[in-house]
Image: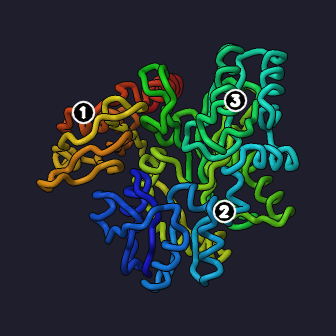
Amino acid sequence: MRVLLVGSGGREHALAASLSRSPVLDTLFTAPGNPGTALFGTNVAIAVDDVPGLVAFALGERIDLVVPGPEAPLVAGLADACLVAGIACAGPTAQAAQLEGSKSFSKAICDAAGIPTARWERFDDAALAHAFVRRRGAPIVVKADGLAAGKGVVVAATVAEAEAAITAMMEQSSLGVAGASVVIEEYLEGDEVSLFALCDGETAVLIGAAQDHKRIGEGDTGANTGGMGAVSPPAFFDRATQEHALDLLVRPMLREMVRVGTPFRGVIFAGLMLTPEGPSLIEYNVRFGDPEAQALLPRLRTDLLPALVALCDGKLAQADLRFSDDASVAVVLAGRGYPGTPAVGSPIRGIDRAEAMTGVRVFQAATAYDAAGSLIGHGGRVLTVVATAPTLMAARDAAYAGVAAIDWPDAIWRRDIGVRALQRALDAAEEFGVSA
């Protein structure tokens, strides 16, 4: 098969590594890719949101399957354009991608399907939004209704913080058109986890779960980021519980999407809160997460490519998708200054040393080559160091050993990825007499 993978991040490097293991893969292109994806195929200089350019390339190269990484091309209609061109695309139509592209759309689907989710209101008028948060109080959550590259959610501890978010989004246009309207919802307490499944219409096949670490600082402090690390699977969210969450939060959504004439096919990423009353949906995303994909995909033990083809063909129920029982820990290395303006241009050395360690992989994102041919940091989140091992403790130790092997003067990273999950695992191990 000839495959076009769309994207340029660590998620796409992890997808490229997984796809390259398939015996049915002939050729892999990645648009635009990064130095990591180039290790498994050919990078092509087409932007992720250049839908006409992507489709023209796919036609010219006789591509059999397009695999979208990020959400932007899906919301822009990549799957629709592929359908018109007769090219299989493992992602949803633009209308179905509104599950991620519009917070109010996904909330309305949840309400219609009876899916547990936070109570919410949508506002187009900033004055009404201000009045609402003054009336409701805090903590409260303010979300840009549209796509905001992971920057559109403010968990406000005070009314003043909520009002500042409304002012920035709606009155100062800090997020552009994405924040012209907002969804304001109740604050949920509990453990936040990410659940992933492949879907084709009403069928959902579990991929697995991960727990992201969104804040820049240790102890979940500081600004939100695109994700500073992940653990898979969460120590307190076993496979039976994941299947229950699919039954509660994903499969009813799929039935409702079919009922309203917008069936969903692709990867669903359900962000959910494990509250004392049970799982509650925070949001849907229509693609793999980043860095969750880097933690999940190294645990894959079967061929991803035929499963994606089955998704496109409506035969997902026949797909063989199995993951190891190993634990995985992913640690993101970002450029100094992130999530503000990151330092760029300093050389990165030692990736080969890290990958020589048992169970360790390094996925590249914002990397580039300088004029001398040296690998350099070139953006915010630059590398993800991932380790898999039979226990969470061993995986975490190996991941941080991999980080220590990398020589990059501008790197910053969290030193507590997986600490909370490890403590939960240790508590369970003590209770049941097993290893953590």
Which residue lies at the image location 45% right of the left edge and 38% below the top edge?
Answer: 230
Residue 151 appears in the picture as rendered = yes
Q: Secondary structure beneath disc 1?
A: loop
- Depth order, front residue of 222/434: 222
Crowding at mark 1 (Cα within 10 Å: few <14, some 14-19, many 20+):
some
Q: Gap in Å between the C-alphas at discs 2 and 3?
A: 29 Å
Which amino acid type is marked by label 2?
Cys
Which amino acid type is marked by label 3?
Val
Label whose residue precedes the other's in the sequence (2 or 3): 3
Which amino acid type is marked by label 1?
Asp
Residue 45 figure quarter: bottom left
Q: Which residue is mark 2?
A: 199
Horizontal side of 265 relative to 9 (left or right) equals right
Q: Which residue is mark 1?
A: 410
Quarter the N terminus occupies: bottom left
Q: Gap in Å between the C-alphas at discs 2 and 1?
A: 40 Å
Q: Secondary structure beneath disc 2?
A: strand
Residue 244 appears in the picture as rendered = no
Crowding at mark 2 (Cα within 10 Å: few <14, some 14-19, many 20+):
many
Measured from the top left, where is residue 16 in percent x and y?
A: 39, 63
Q: Secondary structure beneath disc 3?
A: strand
